[in-house]
Every structure is written in C-alpha cells, then in structure tokens.
Amino acid sequence: DTEVTQTPKHLVMGMTNKKSLKCEQHMGHRAMYWYKQKAKKPPELMFVYSYEKLSINESVPSRFSPECPNSSLLNLHLHALQPEDSALYLCASSQEASFGPQHFGDGTRLSIL
Amino acid sequence: DQQVKQNSPSLSVQEGRISILNCDYTNSMFDYFLWYKKYPAEGPTFLISISSIKDKNEDGRFTVFLNKSAKHLSLHIVPSQPGDSAVYFCAASESNTGKLIFGQGTTLQVKP
C-alpha cells in the first residue's frame, strides 16, 4: 500500500476545462514532487516543493500550476491543456529534498480530449 | 542527452537464479542512486539506494553495487522470484537538489 495518495485515479478533460490533481502524504515529509510519465518512458520531474516553497520548476508550461497548501498536501492545477499533455502524473514525497528516497503515489491517468 | 542509461530494455531469468540489472550514468556530480520497481497501473516503488561514499548496499534479496570510476551501478536480485517480474528503473540525483533523473527502465521477467 502506498503512503502517498493521489486523487483522482483517472481524469478525462477537454482542452478548455480547469481541473486539479491532488496528492496527500502523512509521513511528515517536507519535500514533495510532481512528475509526468508518458507511455514506455521514465518519469520526468516537473516541480519540487521544499518546506512548502517551490524550489524547482523544470521549465513547465504555465498551463500547469502547482500549489502546496500545507506540508501534507500538494495540488496541480490544470488549465487549457493540450492533447500531448495526456500522461500519468505522479506525486512523490521525501523526508527532505536533499535527503532520503522519494516515495511515489500510484498516479493520476490524465486524458485530454 | 541521457544522463542515466539502462541499455537492456528487457531481461528474462529462471526462478531461483540471479537477476542482474545494469545502469550507467554520465554526470559525475550524481552522488545518490536508487532503484525502483514498477508494476502496471501503480507508481514506482522504492527498492534500495546507495550513496556515492559506498560501493555496496544490501537489503534482503537485493544488493546494489556502485563503481564510481566506471560510472556504473547494478542491482542484483537473488534468488529471483516470479513476483519480481516488473519494470526496474535506475535513478540518480545530485545532493541538495531533490532532482531525480531516471533511466529508461528494464523489464524483468522471472519464469517459474
């Protein structure tokens, strides 16, 4: 059982919709991450939050907007996405950004129509 | 430019034998290395890690070896079990960044 919980598991949205992906962990971790994974490819880092502050943005388009409301929660707000944004979106957490392995949730499978 | 490479897309071994998965990296600033296992429809599961100050780390059936001069690491699974069949990702990071770079993955099949 994963200790990083992501909702929803599946999401289908149109290009003009606004939706949010949610991630929660209760391990007391102070670093949280968003990754994107396309079929048969490795996960690619999008954002890193450390102590609720954005520390890394891997040049992600502004149609993806992360938010860290508190140390347990991480959101990814989606707006005006493109079909090529269809992918598995993975959330992860670790004790600190500089320490400890990252533990992943099971992801949200996103499809853009 | 792939900084972390897993050159074998797939590997098939017999149950009870040793599985050896390999990984090469190019960035000499990487100092923390991890292996993850991934089943379909699940997120990657952390298996084992190694810091660059070590050359070996063991956890039960899993052992990771690091050869810094060759920029090479390997994961040994012994004995292999059918439940080990999955995609295995090697990952590396520079200290203090939290940024993990993944290899392309190796699909391991353990035959009964």
Image: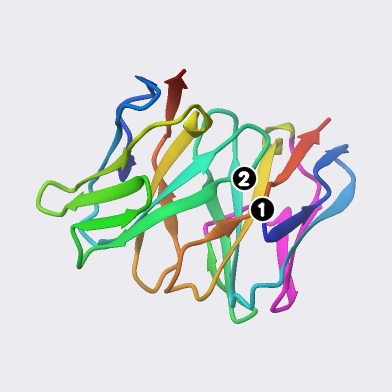
**In the figure, is residue B29 to the left or right of A61?**
left
Q: Is residue A71 magenta?
A: yes
x, y percentage for residue B23?
A: 28, 40
Q: What residue lies at 9% left-to-right and 52% top-to-bottom?
A: B69
A48 over A61 or under it: above or below = below
Q: What residue lies at 71% left-to-right and 72% top-to-bottom?
A: A26
Q: Which residues are magenta?
A: A58-82
Query: What residue does disc 2 label?
Result: B43
Could you tell me which secondary element the residue under label 1 belongs to?
loop
Residue closer to the observer: B86 or B3:
B86
**In the figure, is residue A65 to the left or right of A57?**
right
Query: What residue does disc 1 label?
Result: A105
Q: Chain of mark 1?
A: A
Q: Callout 1, which amino acid?
A: Gly
Q: Is residue B67 magenta?
A: no
Is residue B40 among the parts visible in the rendering? yes
**In the figure, is residue A82 to the left or right of A44?**
right
Q: Quadrant of residue A53?
A: bottom right
x, y percentage for residue B35?
A: 40, 48
Q: Callout 2, which amino acid?
A: Gly
Instruction: Give the alpha-carbon distance from disc 1 to disc 2, as whole Å.
Output: 5 Å
Is residue B1 among the parts visible in the rendering? no
**In the figure, is residue A53 to the left or right of B27?**
right
Asked whether the residues under the numbered discs 1 and 2 touch, taking CB atoms below 8 Å apart as contact, a structural biologist would say yes
Q: Residues within 10 Å of mark 2 (few under 14, many from 20)?
A: many
Q: Residues within 10 Å of mark 1 (few under 14, many from 20)?
A: many
